[in-house]
Each structure stands twice: as C-alpha cells, then as structure tokens.
Image (spheres, rainbow, N blue to C red):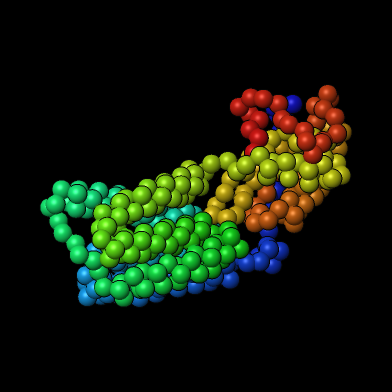
Amino acid sequence: MSSNKPSTGSPTEKKQETLPDPVGSERTREGLLAVHVGLAANTLLAVVKVTVGIIGQSPALLADGINSTSDVAYGVVMSIFMKLSGKPADSEHPYGHDQMESIAAVVVGAFVVSTAIAIFWNSVNGVYEIVSGAGSFSGAAQITFWVSFAVAGFKLWLTLWTGKIGRQTHNIAVEALAQDHRNDIFSALAATVGIFFGRMGFPWVDPLAGALVSLIILYTGVEILRSSTADLMDTVPGKQLGKEIRSLLAAVDGVESVEEVHAHRFGPYLVVNITIGVDGALTVTEGDRIATRAEETLLKNVEFMRRVYVHYHPAALSAGPVSAFSTPESGPDHLQV
C-alpha cells in the first residue's frame, strides 16, 4: 500500500431523517420515560416495603426497602445524565452528548456493586447472630410475605418493559437499569423465601438467601461497569461490524481495496474512518466521486452510522478486487474493526 494519500473524500454526515427510528429526541424521550417510570416505581416500593417491614417486623422486607431507597437515589442521578445526553451537538462536542449515557450506566453499576457488598455483609452478619444465639427472630407477619411476593411480580414486569426499551433504543443506561430491576426480582424472592422459612421456624434461611443473592447482584454490577467503561474507553466495535462494512464497500463501483477500517462509538452512534484503494489513473475528481459513493453507502445501510470519513489513494498493484471477506495487512497502520 502506498503511504502517500494525495486526496481525501470530504466527510459526509448522515442527516437526521435518514437515521433509523428511534433516534434523536424520540430516542431520548423513550429513555427518559423508562428512567422516570423506574424512579417512580422505586419510590413507591421503598415507602411500602419500609413501612410494612417495620409494622410486620420483617428484617428481610425492611432491608429490601432500604435497597429500593438507594435505587431512588441513583435514579435521580440517572435522570440528570439522561437529560444531558439529549443535548444537541455543539462546538465543544461535535458528535453530541450521547456518551453521557455510558456515564449514567457507570453510576448504575457503581450503586449495584456497593449494594451487593452491603447486602452480603449484612446477610453474613445476620447468619452469625442467629447461629451464635446473639440475635433472636420469631417470624414476621403474614402480610410481609404477600407484599414481598407481589414486589417480585411487579419487578418482573418492569424488567421486561425497561429491557425492551433499552434494546429498541440501543441505550446502555436503560439496559443497565433493566438489569438492576432484574436484581430486585432476586432480592424480593430472597426476602419472600426468608420470610416464609422464618415463619416456619428456620430464621437463618433469610440472611443466607440474601448472601447468595448478593453474589448475583455483584456479578451484574461488575458486568454493567465493564460494558459501560468499555464505551468510555473507546473500545473498538466488533469484527461483525468490520465484515458488514467491507461487504457493503465491495458493491461500490470503483473501490478496488479496503485497507483500513477504524470505528468509534459515541453512545449508540458510530463514526468510521476508512481507507480505500482506487485506480491510480483516475483524476482527483473521479476519486472523490468514488469516496462519496462509499460514504453514502455506509450512511444508508449501517444502523446508527453518524459520520463516515473516507481516505483514498492509488490501490497497490498487487491488490485485487475488494472482497467482503478480505482482511487488511497486519501492522499498526492496519487496524481492523
């Protein structure tokens, strides 16, 4: 490949109307709806679980209510970040503010991890007190069992509904929120099991179940942090995207080789830099037309593609026609998606 690049095609930005739905303000609106519904639900559940847990003398339900209280706290933070992510692009943020969604997901992950550690510590302490005889527990009122069971059912619906919105909008923060709702199902079921066996004369089951559930919650929190920080660290998207881009460019008339593909994520959106080889006998104007066709092809066919930058230069003499399955040469200057 020649190291000289005499000309580049000018970048083309996909217009808002050509992006697939849901995008823009509609996508932000749906994301905020999921966050606000979750915030309202957690506020209501926190009040109900804490109140019934105290009246019904259920440590399990009371602890679950405290967990919902922490959900309310980070729900407020998420709402703020989600609103900021919907701000339009400006001179300082030419690609928009969509990475605020990744920051919001980091906030969720941090809260989930801290909650898991707190639940595990309290659960292990509870088992020790019961086994050692330092603590006593005669069983909670029956209403606490039914409230905890109903909470698990409600959280199941909320998990499915929030997860659907997260997948439709490709919103990592909403997907993280759905995972946290799923954790609340496990917490509520653990409280339900603990209350049931506590009433049957086995009080140690309650904190033991809580300890096991905390490990599941911890794993979820770590996964949320891993995926969200990968976006913030600008991790290169997967190989499947590279194959898709190469397959599309193979059909563009005049593209003789695809030598480099660099893709970057900004929230759900993609910005791609590609280097293509064209016939060295063509004029600069003709090369520019080929680069423009390549840009338009990717903008039209790749979901959530926001900008495409095409660099072109004479194709190497040994390079054959571009293939959808061709791979670039190895080396630091040939990073494949």
Nearer the observer, 156 or 260: 156
Nearer the observer, 270 or 1: 270
Is any atom of residue 203 visible in this view? yes
Query: Quarter holding the N terminus?
Result: top right
Residue at image location 33% in from the left, 64% down from the top: 196
Nearer the observer, 332 or 302: 302
Work out which residue is located at the far front of the displayed protein and give it. Answer: 200
Above or below, 329 against 118 in this view is above
Above or below, 123 against 70 in this view is above
Work out which residue is located at the far left of the displayed protein and give it. Answer: 134
Total numbered labels placed on residues in the image: 0
Above or below, 207 against 77 in this view is above
Residue at image location 70% in from the left, 48% down from the top: 10
Is any atom of residue 36 visible in this view? no
Q: Position of residue 28 (x, y in %)?
A: 53, 67
Nearer the observer, 110 or 299: 110
Q: Position of residue 207 (x, y in %)?
A: 28, 54
Residue at image location 81% in from the left, 48% down from the top: 289
Residue at image location 80% in from the left, 50% down from the top: 293
Q: Position of residue 235 (x, y in %)?
A: 53, 41
User: Residue 245 lies in what quarter of the image?
Assistant: top right
User: Residue 141 lies in what quarter of the image?
Assistant: bottom left
Q: Is residue 109 left or right of residue 90?
A: left
Q: Is residue 90 left or right of residue 318?
A: left
Query: Quarter holding the C terminus?
Result: top right
